[in-house]
Amino acid sequence: MQGSYLTEVRDQYEAYPYPHREPADEKKRCIPTYLDYLDQLNHYGFGGKRDFRKDFRVLIAGGGTGDSAIFLAEQLRDTGAEIIYLDISTASMAIAKERAEVRALSNLQFVHGSLLDVGSLKLGMFDYINCSGVLHHLEKPEDGLKALTKVLKPEGVMGIMLYARYGRTGIYQLQELMRMINQGVKSLPERVANCRATLASMLKNPGVMALGITESVLPRLSDSDIYDLFLHTHDRAYTIPELYAFMSSAKLSIHQLFSPEDARGNLTYDPTVYAKNPALRNTLSTLSDVEQKAAAELMHGNIRKHVFYASRKPSIPADMNDTTMIPALSIALEGKLYAQLQDEAAKAADTITLKRGIKAVQFRKTSYTALLLKYMDGTRTIGEIYQAVLTETSDASNAEVLPRIAKDFEHMFRSLQLHNWIFLRSGNAAPYRTLDMIGR
């Protein structure tokens, strides 16, 4: 390892591997990582047409204690895919290795090194590069992004998470405070102890309360959590314009911005959802795409992370007008949900509702909704579903009925896409392993 990284950052992750994980827990649960759901990655990154059984190579750039590596390796078990984990922290890598051993995963290769040196490590080219929560800790993030781009295949996709500036305002205030309090303190454990004492003294502070830190939550934060959030020696955050400029500097296009922890789902970056005044909504809708997302970030005020896919080519998600595609509910959802949706459609008078935690989807029950849900099982193509619905419809001609069926399907599909609860894949692509199969 050539050492082209900030040594204090490496020292932090040697002392406090992040996130804190106990390898033995792999026997009882799997931790999904949002960007790495293969059905979502395929839909947005590869137009639903990538068969992950065929020469699929993955790089986890800054793999930490192994969440992404383990989740991807489980999904890609027995496919022939190759997954390479790369990290500067030997302590973090040791935990990731042990987790893989507990799960008996044989499709992972562990490499100790910096992503800045990825080209000289001769690891080859990659179809998918995960770099979540890493680039913003580099002295020059643009160098890291360019290094990764050089090992990304022409049709490849990156899954990236970067900090968002405005939503982290309170965090940066606390970081500044801790730099004052910890002046001259060399011991990392002493810095953590000082931070815990400070937070305990500020539980009524609006900024601390906004972060969800309470008297009961504080003891449950690991030392790794405390250090990464409030004591990190180097992190930077991006506004939407800065984010797009950063990606453009490496000639990358952003595919899809996600908000996995927001009840607004894919509408989080739509400024019109925050505007009650019709004239204001109209004004906002006239802005450019980047300006609209920038306005939404400012109006929201609490977006802490930008989570997205990027590649050299503009976004071309899977097309619902391609009737050879197979619609399937997200692998994150339980398999019995197909039957539950069918029952809901049969019982509902006007509206079908699906809730999971803080997230909810509602869509109108249209003429063909119940039949569409009856035949959508994750194995039939859109065309096969339409044909099955046609066989149960009235005596109207196909030319009259088919456009109405397609319109009803689009309404249902777009509604479920609010939280990325449905995706499309080509019939040539193998079905994905679900969380039910892996073990939640």
Image: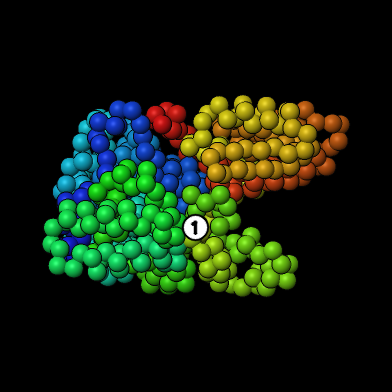
Q: Nearer the viewer, residue 51 or 101?
A: 101
- For this rendering, which residue is in front, 342 or 279? 279
Mark 1, residues whose alpha carbon is within 10 Å: few (<14), some, or many (≥20)? Answer: some
For the point 41% across and 56% down, the residue is 204
Q: Quadrant of residue 83?
A: top left
What is the number of callouts on the image?
1
Give the position of the N terminus as an image quadrant.
Answer: bottom left
One can see residue 278 in this view? yes
Query: Residue placed at 21% from the left, 53% from the top?
Result: 193
Horizontal side of 437 relative to 66 (left or right) equals right
Q: Nearer the viewer, residue 272 or 144?
A: 272
Residue located 36% across and 67% down the image:
173
Instruction: Look at the picture and state if 392 lies above or below 358.
Output: above
Q: Position of residue 163 (x, y in %)?
A: 39, 61
Q: Quadrant of the C terminus?
A: top left
Colour convention: rainbow
- Residue 37 percent across, percent down from the top left: 43, 43
- Amino acid type shown at disc 1: Leu
Looking at this rendering, what residue extends furthest in the right direction? 395
Identity of the residue drawn at 55% across and 38% down: 356
Where does residue 141 sit, x and y in percent of width and height?
A: 30, 67
* Left or right: 121 in relation to 159: left
Q: Tag 1's secondary structure?
A: strand
Check the image and report above or below for 28 versus 281: above
- 218 lies above or below 25: below
Please state the horizontal and vertical placement of residue 364, each as a whole percent of the image: 74, 42
- Answer whether residue 145 is visible to the viewer in this image: no
Residue where numbered disc 1 is placed: 257
